Structures are given as structure tokens and as C-alpha cells.
Image (spheres, coloured by chain):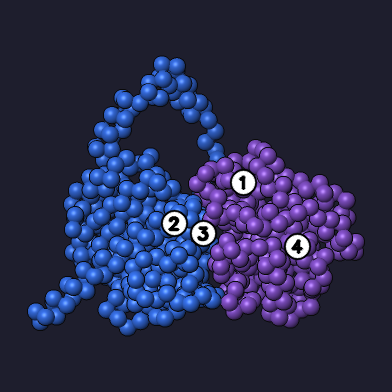
């Protein structure tokens, strides 16, 4: 893995590139993270997915959106517009690193919405699209959608100590209803990945896609009180297989 | 990663409002195997104060819960301290190291991080000869463990470390229960008995934490002995205790009680900050925490400078 920063000099983002192991498939995969507490909890699963994809021959890049993780800035730079640009910049970075002209996207939760928008936006060519526990609207992030899960994203909002440092409130409030998913190119291969207990984005039901599901708990929900989520080994293997075949 | 705003490197002890102002950040891969991943945050106009190594707790990666470690590193760097936050082997982006034992790996990781911080993040000044370790939760336990054997550590900030239970803890707990209307009501209603039975019947087959948790657990005696070793080097300690410790520590004096030989009022300070939670979840909490740490670091640096000047005059 090689870590470095990319993007504009005064607003750079942290990125981590997993170069493909031999034999290279000449396939590049950009991982789009969830946000807030979900980002923290899912970090290990995303890192392991990157390693598995790289072992299978893909060049993989993951990054932190502006104002999150190790990237520059604070709440004030967490805007949907900037995050969309981060995705484009990250794809550009990956295409340069891997010397390819197409990128597959794997988006988890909020990252799935970002992936759909990037695929529709057409600023780079998307080869395959993985929508993992997709949230298409901000409403999907509400705790009622996660009934039964011990500590969903916005349980934190109810705890009056929590809100300011983790929630990308500006991004959430900008996530209006969108029909972007319906405008995806029908020929684009799409895989929907569904963890047990995760809310189902029914707005994607019309989307021609394959489905991968498992009984494993969502990686973005805290496992007991470890602060991190479980690693869904079956799903990671399934995503890797689908991307690489 | 770099910040655009103008520098605030005036050496003032106050914490700058804009935490990103005047600092520079660089992602690093370092260590004996080149496999540790960290982010070095440095003052743009040069470090003038003691470098600080931040040690995250548990299995959360180097940004820390609530991204608190990022805010802390940037604020301290804006005030003149170079800061390094990193992932222990097998946590976050750092890969598992080949050392056979957890203790060996964690100790080596922290030694490597101190070396990197001193090499990459400090200017030639009296304060660059050593570092402060700032540990959170299990990171605080790791800091205490390593500091006893590493002469480069000059100061420790321990946020919610393990504080061993003492006779005083049990006495205070008993007293609280005796006077608690809630406990009395639970007893009378039979709720507490029902809860105990429910706990006995509950499923204990939940998964355990990952094998490599990065926690150097030690006995009360060894903790005491390690603090005693720090006394010989005059290493200052700031213990910051939040509401997160109340299940095992119910009064500030318990730190002294738990260290019968090691506690030294000239070197130890306890901040009992029950308005902070264990995750430093809000901006206000992070600011309060940084302000305490910052002003404490300024105080000990001044004292150390005074001592050094006095020593050089005597020579």
C-alpha cells in the first residue's frame, strides 16, 4: 500500500493505493467510503476489501472525503459538491496510477449514492458498479431504517454529546431525492450487496442488477463496543469475485 | 496535505480557533519494516515546542473517535508542537508485524514512532531531545508501559487510562449505593435480583475482540513500578479522567491510591473532567481537552527550561 495526498494543494485528500499483484488484470477499483461514524466502523472492512482486490490483480484506491478522516479541512469543507469533485479527482488519480482508462466503483452506504452520481455524471468511464448497503436518500440514514441494529449512524444524533464532530450535516441535508439511479446506462454491470438487517434501498429495485446478500452483520454498525464493525468475509470475497471475473 | 490559512506560530499558549491554520500534514510509512502508517502534522513555521506522539485507543484507526485526534494534532501543531498519529501494527492501515508477541510488536511500534517523530518533526532546540506521549484509553496504557523504558519520553498525557480499583474505590462505591434511592428502589422491587438472573442466563457467545487489540495490560503492581521508574527521570504525568472511567474509577484521588509507591505530587496532575465523554464527541469537549493539554505542556516546558538554565549557570 502506498499512502499519499492528492487533489488541489490547498484542499488535498488522503488516499491509499493498493497496487495490483501479478498477474495484473488491468482493472482499477475506486472504493467510496461511507461517512461519519459509519466511516470509522467500516474502515477495516474497506481496507481488507482493497487488499483482497489487489491480491486478485486489481489496482485499488480509497480515500477520505474532504473534511473527513485524514483529509484536509473540517466541517466547513464537507459539502456534497466538494465530495463529488473528490470522487472525480480520486478516479483521475487512480487512472494515472494504474494506467487504465476505466474505473470500477464500490460504494458503501453514502458511498453508494456518490458512486451512482459519479456513474451518471460521466466525468470518467465507469466499468462496473457495486452498491453496498446503498443509501440513496438522506432518509435512509435515519435510525428507524435500522431497527434492530445496535448502534446505527444516527443513534448518535440522539445522544446530545455526539453531533458536531462526525456527522456531515451539510452533505446529508443536500442529499435530495434523486432519480440518478434510473439514469444509469442499462448496459453498466451493477451488483447490489445487501448485509443482513441493513435497510433496503427500494428505489433501486427497478435497476437491472445482480444481488449478493449474506447473513453477516453490516460492517458499518459497531460490533459490541469495539468502536469498529465486523468484517463480512463472505461479502468481501463475493465482491472481489464479481469485480474480477 | 496542507492547510491554506496563514500561520499563527507566535508561540502563544492559547489554542488557535482555526485548528487547521498554519500547519502542514504529510502521510508517512515508517518503522522497522516500513509498514506503519501515520500522519505527521507540523507547524508551518517550524516546531518550537516538544513533539507529541498521539496514541489512539482500541481498534479505531489513527483519526480516533469523533476524528478527535486529527483536531488535537492540528491544534497542537498550530501552537508549535509537531505531532504524529499512527496505527499500531495490524490496526487501521498498518499491516501485521512479524514479531511473535503482541508486547514486542506494540513496544517496537511506539519506539519506531518516537524515532520518526524526532527525526522528521522536530527542529534543533532543547525541546526536541524528547517527546510527550498523548494516549487515549488503551493508548494511554500503552504510553505508560513504553515510557518507563524509553528515556526519550519526557511527559505523558493519559486520557482515561486504566486506574486500578482500590480499597477507596470500593468504600466510595458502597457509600454511594447506601445513599442511592435508585439502588434502594431496585432492591425493594426485586429488579436488581431479576437483572442478575438475566445476566446469568444471557448468551455469552458473542464474538471476542480481534486477537490483536494493541493493549499492553499490566498488573496494579507493575503499573506502580513503572510509574516509579518514571519518577527517576522526572517524567511529568497529566491524568485526564472523563465520565468514561466511572465504572472503575470514582474519584480523582484514586489515581494516587492506586500508585502507592509511584504517585508523586510534584510530577502527577489529575484533571477530573466529568463534562468530557470517553469519545470527546463534541467540538466543545475537544477544545477544552486541548486547552488543558496545551497549557500543561507550556507549564512543564517552562519549568524544564528554567531547570536547564539553572543547571548551566551552576556548571
Relative to residue B174, is residue A199 depicted above or below? below
**Residue that mark 1 sits on:** A154
Say if labels 4 and 1 share a chain: yes
- Check the residue under mark 3 and report the chain it is in: B
Q: Position of residue A165 (x, y in %)?
A: 53, 55
Horizontal arrangement in the rendering, residue B96 relative to residue B310 (left or right): right
Disc 2: CA contacts within 10 A as few (<14), some (14-19) or many (>=20): many
**Residue that mark 2 sits on:** B286
Q: Quadrant of the N terminus of chain A?
A: bottom right
Relative to residue B280, is residue A63 depicted above or below? below
- Colour displayed for chain A in the image of the structure: purple
**Residue that mark 3 sits on:** B67
Determine whether the residue tagged by mark 4 lies in a helix, strand or loop.
helix
Determine whether the residue tagged by mark 1 lies in a helix, strand or loop.
loop
Determine whether the residue tagged by mark 2 lies in a helix, strand or loop.
helix
- Check the residue under mark 4 and report the chain it is in: A
Label 1, label 2: how many angstroms apart (C-alpha)? Answer: 21 Å
**Residue that mark 4 sits on:** A115
Disc 4: CA contacts within 10 A as few (<14), some (14-19) or many (>=20): many
Label 2, label 3: how many angstroms apart (C-alpha)? Answer: 10 Å
Determine whether the residue tagged by mark 3 lies in a helix, strand or loop.
helix
Q: Residue furthest left?
A: B314
Amino acid at each position: 500500500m502506498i499512502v499519499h495526498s492528492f487533489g488541489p494543494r490547498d484542499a488535498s485528500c488522503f488516499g491509499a493505493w493498493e497496487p495490483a499483484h501479478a498477474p495484473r488484470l488491468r482493472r482499477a477499483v475506486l472504493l467510496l467510503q461511507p461517512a461519519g461514524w459509519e466511516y470509522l466502523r467500516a474502515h477495516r472492512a474497506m481496507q481488507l476489501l482493497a487488499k483482497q482486490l489487489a491480491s486478485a490483480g486489481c489496482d485499488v484506491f480509497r480515500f477520505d472525503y474532504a473534511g473527513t478522516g485524514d483529509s484536509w479541512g473540517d466541517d466547513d469543507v464537507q459539502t456534497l459538491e466538494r465530495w463529488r469533485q473528490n470522487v472525480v479527482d480520486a478516479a483521475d488519480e487512480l487512472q494515472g496510477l494504474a494506467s487504465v482508462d476505466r474505473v470500477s466503483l464500490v460504494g458503501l452506504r453514502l458511498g453508494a449514492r456518490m458512486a451512482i452520481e459519479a456513474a451518471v455524471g460521466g466525468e470518467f468511464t465507469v466499468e462496473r458498479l457495486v452498491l453496498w448497503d446503498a443509501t440513496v436518500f438522506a432518509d435512509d440514514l435515519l435510525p428507524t431504517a435500522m431497527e434492530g441494529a445496535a448502534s446505527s449512524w444516527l443513534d448518535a444524533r440522539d445522544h446530545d454529546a455526539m453531533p458536531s464532530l462526525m456527522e456531515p450535516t451539510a452533505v446529508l441535508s443536500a442529499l435530495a431525492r434523486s432519480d440518478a439511479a434510473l439514469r444509469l446506462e442499462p448496459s453498466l454491470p451493477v451488483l447490489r450487496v445487501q448485509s443482513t438487517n441493513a435497510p433496503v434501498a427500494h428505489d433501486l429495485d427497478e435497476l437491472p442488477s445482480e444481488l449478493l446478500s449474506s447473513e453477516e452483520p453490516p460492517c458499518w454498525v459497531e460490533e459490541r463496543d469495539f468502536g469498529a464493525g465486523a468484517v463480512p468475509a463472505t461479502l468481501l470475497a463475493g465482491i472481489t469475485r464479481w469485480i474480477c471475473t | 496535505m496542507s492547510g491554506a490559512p496563514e500561520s499563527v506560530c507566535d508561540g502563544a499558549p492559547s489554542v488557535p480557533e482555526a485548528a487547521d491554520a498554519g500547519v502542514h500534514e504529510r502521510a508517512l510509512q515508517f518503522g522497522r519494516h516500513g509498514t506503519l502508517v501515520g500522519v505527521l502534522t507540523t507547524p508551518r513555521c517550524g516546531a518550537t515546542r516538544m513533539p507529541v506522539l498521539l496514541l489512539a485507543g482500541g481498534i479505531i484507526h489513527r483519526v480516533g473517535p469523533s476524528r478527535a485526534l486529527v483536531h488535537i494534532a492540528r491544534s497542537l501543531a498550530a501552537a508549535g508542537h509537531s505531532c504524529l498519529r499512527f496505527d499500531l501494527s495490524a490496526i487501521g492501515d498498518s499491516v501485521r508485524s512479524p514479531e511473535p508477541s503482541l508486547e514486542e510488536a506494540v513496544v517496537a511500534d511506539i519506539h519506531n514512532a518516537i524515532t520518526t517523530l524526532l527525526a522528521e518533526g522536530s527542529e534543533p532546540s532543547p525541546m526536541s531531545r524528547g517527546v510527550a506521549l498523548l494516549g487515549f484509553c488503551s493508548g494511554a496504557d500503552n504510553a505508560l508501559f513504553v515510557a518507563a523504558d524509553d528515556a526519550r519520553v519526557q511527559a505523558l498525557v493519559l486520557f482515561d487510562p486504566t486506574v486500578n480499583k482500590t480499597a477507596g474505590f470500593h468504600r466510595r462505591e458502597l457509600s454511594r449505593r447506601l445513599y442511592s434511592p435508585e439502588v434502594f428502589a431496585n432492591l425493594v422491587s426485586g429488579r436488581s435480583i431479576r437483572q442478575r438472573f438475566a445476566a446469568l442466563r444471557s448468551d455469552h457467545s458473542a464474538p471476542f475482540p480481534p486477537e490483536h487489540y494493541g493493549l499492553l495490560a499490566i498488573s496494579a503492581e507493575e503499573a506502580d513500578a513503572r510509574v516509579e521508574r518514571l519518577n527517576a527521570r522526572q517524567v511529568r504525568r497529566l491524568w485526564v479522567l472523563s465520565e468514561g472511567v466511572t465504572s472503575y474509577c470514582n474519584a480523582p484521588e484514586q489515581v494516587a491510591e492506586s500508585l502507592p509507591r509511584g504517585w508523586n505530587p510534584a510530577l502527577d496532575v489529575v484533571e477530573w473532567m466529568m463534562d468530557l465523554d470517553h469519545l470527546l464527541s463534541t467540538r466543545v469537549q475537544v477544545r477544552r481537552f486541548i486547552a488543558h493539554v496545551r497549557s500543561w505542556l507550556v507549564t512543564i516546558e517552562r519549568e524544564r527550561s528554567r531547570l536547564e538554565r539553572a543547571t548551566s549557570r551552576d556548571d
